[in-house]
Image (tube, rainbow, N blue to C red):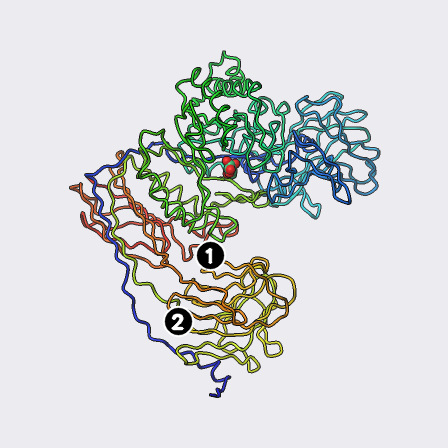
Amino acid sequence: MLKFNTFAISCLLFFQLPVTPLPAASLTININAAQPGPRLNPGMYGIFLEEINHGVDGGLYAEMIRNRGFEDAKPPEGFTFRPGNGGRPGRWMAGQYDAESFAGSIRLDYFNPDGTMKDFPYWSLIKDGAAQGSMNLDTNNPLDPAGPRSLRLEIDDPGSGRLGIANEGFFGVGVAAGKKYNLSFWARGEGSSGPLTASVENSAGTPCVVPVTLNGVTGQWTQFHAAMTATQTDAKARFVLTAGARGKVWFDMVSLFPADTFKNRPNGLRPDLAQFLADLKPGFVRFPGGCVIEGGTIETAFNWKDSIGPLPGRREQFGPWGYRETHGMGMFEYLQFCEDIGAAPLYVGFAGETCHFRDVKDVPMDEMGWVTTNFLDAIQFANGPATSPWGKLRAGQGHPESFNLKLVEVGNEGQARTFPPRYQLVHAALKSQYPDISYINDFSFIRRNQMGAEPADIEDNHYYQNPEWFMNNTHLYDNRDRNLPPVYDGEVAVTSGDNSNEHGTLLDALSEGAFLMGLERNADAVKMVSYAPLLANVSGRTDWHGMIYFDSLHSCATVSYYLWKIFGLNRPDYTVAADIDYHPGELAAITGAVGVGTWNNSAEFKDIRIEKDGQLLYASDFTKGTAGWKTEGGNWSVVDGAYRQRNSDPNGLLSYIGDETWSNCTITLKARKVGVRGEGFLIAFGKKGGDKYWWNVGGYGNSQHDVELNQTIIGRPVRSALEPDRWYDVKIVLQDRRIQCFLDDKQIHDISVPAQDRFFANAGRDEASGELVIKAINVSPNPVSGTLHVAGFSQFASQGDLTVLASARLADNNTLSDPQKVIPVNGRITIPGDTFTCDFPANSLTLIRLKTK
Ligand code: AHR
């Protein structure tokens, strides 16, 4: 057996392997403007705005006080309380579901440990120093019967301290220094006329605003107003309201709004979030759901009539996404927002069937009258003359003109058998009274032949899929029967297969873009499309994601947002023929440095050997040191001859050896996970530039082994766990693009990494600007240079506009702390004539706008 001087090896044994250039990819795009395709609906790209993930309450709707009306103490409507037993807390149940499981993983704060409702979720009593008093829920003498609960503060003795109430807001009250905030609340007193002092303070109790003091509380409900200016910025402050004299004071509708709202509307919207939406220039807004309109019980289905008029009269209700909806952004505000951003309203109404992901309940057929009437009245509220009963209410809210509602969706994701008769009943009534409106029916969970009579004017479909599905389905509508009603893809997003919890990554965006190109090419069949869900509070989201994320002060848009914006703003009037001739280059072997690492735990590694064709590239002897290893995070040291990472940071903490030329090698080592907590260990290879593979052994909470490329799983994961503190023999054999992984000599994976390079393009004509609009998507870690031939024009401007959305890794995305990591970059492209070249970067969307005649 050969004996090596291992110290010398660990420092010196990095063979530089010769690099043979591989044949490059080739790409030709032939565009022929003489072959026009279908015209696109000018309103094709819209948005779907649902109250989910605190997208509206605690998000777009700018109210900063949570549980302002003290109605959160109300049990979820339509649920019954099942008392606990055997130590199990009680639960609010609707059918076989409890209120918690309705909402997925969201944390509900409504319940006491025994499962009963808390009196004051999100509120607390302030009793500082010698102050004496209490707060109690009161349903006597309500401000409005629609919201019967109020808070009674009993001030026995303010002493030298403070007695009052505090509100934590929606995951913190966010104030920004210099900004103004409008406070309002209703109060009545008994034996007290105030004073009341309002402030916003940080966790140390220091005011973040100039506090305001109000007097004049009487025995009658009176609304108080005050403006406050912030002196400090804090995203997680709390609102406090204290009383200065003995007596009793009742509070209701305690509200704090930023003075700046979108379009300066009172009871308005957060300007940053509303602007993100307005910037999409959506053709339509589908609202207010989704599952929200269906409800989890018939009592919690969205009833727009509870959402209009003065705020105290709007009935709040528990929503299917795990929190109570204030209806502060109600029917009128949705319609107003549509008008403010120049989008057509698309109202979705409850059609008698609750959400089929919860406790499916159907309104009995002989009781469907109110369901139908609600649709008819909604249309009258939106469009009817100011003299009509519901039009008058709209006019009373400040909008005598019609909102011109032309799109109405009857139900959301109805299911077979029970939904069709309800749809037919409602649709027939609507069609006879309002024949000019287009009615939409969702076919996501029902087939056309199950619907029977009353065909829809537009058919809705929802696609929550993985990136591969979207790329593979760019031709989904190529063969659709054009005699069928047109399509609206109302809910579209990558929600799996991207190894991301946030979604909207560059990979997700590009694959959604490939799908959208197919919709544009089939625009004679597909009239509308929207992404879902749209908004997500980073602290208040469900299992669902958002296209735009935010906290109480900051916001950011995902890469998907920017891609959809590029598509929406560069919608051609009609497509033209665009044929792609694309040959990916020969696929390179997996090549790059080797590494070891951890995820959310500590692990040790030793006896590392890397061989190629019987030659030793590297062998470790950590007793002699760690020369040659380059760490990327973590806390690395040598313990008893093993290389140990002891930091439990959740991110992948790695250390690498070797260089970017290593390929076709066999890696052997011993590894063990240290301690029970966290995951197993990571063995990286093919680390080149920003790209890397790793074998994730005991990943996903020590539940599975899988191979990942840039943290996206490739091949099939194997369910298994590692024993803590046990040394395992690890072997990885790399042959070209084949990866074989062994644990204790047992083969766990045998994966051939497929070609991942994909190229998509389409083209169309913008008549107003006289431009040819070309969109191209390169889903590949390699740039590709393409030749474009454009027929059908005699003149070309010498330069065109170029917009590129790209990043080093397909997994890249924007975050609140790095909101501009992946955003479009504008440039110019030289156009010598009808044939020109364009370099399409790796992992990119490229948009070319080119003046032609
Ligand atoms: O977008 C989230 C939900 O997904 C919608 O509420 C519903 O329509 C679909 O099931």
Type of amino acid at the residue the image marks with label 1: Thr
Read off the residue under disc 1.
712
Q: Is residue 269 above or below residue 205?
A: above
Secondary structure of residue under mark 2: loop
Q: Quadrant of residue 460?
A: top left
Secondary structure of residue under mark 1: strand
The residue carrying pointer 1 sits among few (fewer than 14), some (14 to 19) or many (20 or more) residues within 10 Å by Cα, namely some
Residue under the image location 28 percent in, 59 percent down: 25
Query: In the picture provided, is 639 more to the left or to the right than 116?
Result: left
Can residue 399 be seen in the rendering of this structure?
Answer: yes
User: Ligand 1 closer than 8 Å to the CB at disc 1?
Assistant: no
Type of amino acid at the residue the image marks with label 2: Ser
User: Ligand 1 closer than 8 Å to the CB at disc 2?
Assistant: no
Residue under the image location 52 percent in, 69 percent down: 746
The residue carrying pointer 2 sits among few (fewer than 14), some (14 to 19) or many (20 or more) residues within 10 Å by Cα, namely many
The image position of residue 790, as x and y in percent, is: 20, 45
Query: In the picture provided, is 502 more to the left or to the right than 233?
Result: left
Residue under the image location 41 percent in, 38 percent down: 280
Find the distance from the CA under tag 2 to the CA under tag 1: 21 Å
Read off the residue under disc 2.
663
The image position of residue 395, as x and y in percent, is: 51, 17
**Mark found first going from the N terminus, 2 or 1:** 2
Q: Quadrant of the C terminus?
A: top left
The image position of residue 115, as x and y in percent, is: 73, 39
